[in-house]
Image (cartoon, rainbow, N blue to C red):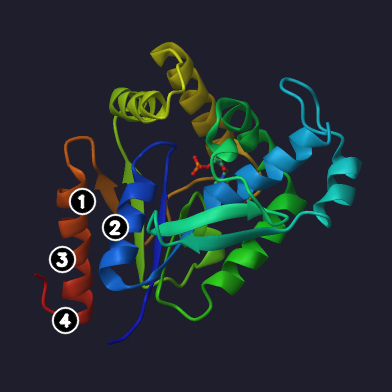
Amino acid sequence: MKQITIAIDGYSSCGKSTLAKALAAKLGYKYVDTGAMYRCITLYLMRCGIVKHHETIDHQKLIEELEHINVTFKFNPALGFSEAYLNDENVEKEIRLMPVSENVSKVSTFKEVRQKMVALQKQMGKSKGVVMEGRDIGTAVFPNAELKLFMTADIEVRVQRRFDELHSKGIMISEEDVKKNLSERDLEDTTRNENPLVKAHDAIDLDNSDLNPQQQLDFVLKLIADMLLIPAE
Ligand code: DC
């Protein structure tokens, strides 16, 4: 069957990863979480003291360190998805914690960071058969993707989802702090100069405020079936 590229963009905590993972599993495609890649870079820069919360980042030092950063994914069969590795260290859990979430959008504004990541992402998806999610996939990474989705959801719904996710992992944080982090990241991600989060002109809107994961998956499978004329189940 013809393999396609599926690009999913959208705001923070819109359920992009959940949908992308389900789609990749259903279609036998590769799944790439590009947010994890920016989170790995942020973690590295935090560890070497170049990124500190609320402090200006030394641009020159950031550029110098970039060449020492290697981001990869390795499939974990027990979990059923790929985990992020920073210079061969599994950092899947650490990159999801608040300190990284608080700094990642700032790090993602740098042109050199984006150039490095976009080049890697293009490479990862060059054989098609990929579901890639992030903020600039349909606009900068794969502007010719066969299917582009732009995901949105009400801020209160997103806050609740993120809050539940963090609490299920034992990370106790207030709803207020979750909301602050999501709002700050949305603002930074949509207003930066380099590849800001914008809807590609040919992307299909998916507001999932009132849709459960199965309904979202069915919606997209139907779109693919209509596009490729393959039978939807
Ligand atoms: O998807 P996520 O919430 O894990 O992404 C974390 C941050 O990474 C997000 O706030 C902005 C940045 N990011 C980006 O700039 N471009 C992407 N393609 C993916 C993520």
Residue positioned most to the bottom: 1
Residue for badge 1: 216
Q: Mark 2 points at which residue?
A: 22
- How would you rate the neighbour count of disc 4 (Cα within 10 Å): few for under 14, some for 14-19, many for 20 or more? few
Disc 4 to disc 3, C-alpha distance:
10 Å
- Residue 118 point in image, percent of width and height: 63, 61
User: Ligand 1 within 8 A of label 4's CB?
Assistant: no
Secondary structure state at the residue bearing disc 3: helix
Please rate how many residues cluster around mark 1, counting C-alpha atoms within 10 Å: few if below 14, some from 14 to 19, many from 20.
Answer: many
The residue type indicated by label 2 comes to Ala
As displayed, is residue 168 above or below residue 177?
below
Q: How far is disc 3 from disc 1 in space, using C-alphas?
A: 10 Å
Task: State the residue position of label 3.
Answer: 222
Taking the image in four quarters, ligand 1 sits in the one at top right
Q: Nearer the viewer, residue 207 or 230?
A: 230
7 to 91, vertically: above or below: below
Residue depicted at x 26% and y 48%: 206
Of callouts 4 and 2, the N-terminal one: 2
Q: Distance between the residues labelled 3 and 2?
A: 14 Å
Q: Earlier in the sequence, mark 2 or mark 1?
A: 2
Left or right of 219 on screen, residue 1: right
Say if residue 109 shows up in the picture.
no
Write down the residue under mark 4: 229
Mark 4 or 3 closer to N-term? 3
Q: Which residue type does callout 3 highlight?
A: Lys
Mark 3 and mark 1 lie on one chain; the one further toward the N terminus is: 1
Whole-number angstrom distance, CA of label 1 to CA of label 4: 19 Å
Closer mark to the observer between disc 2 and disc 1: 2
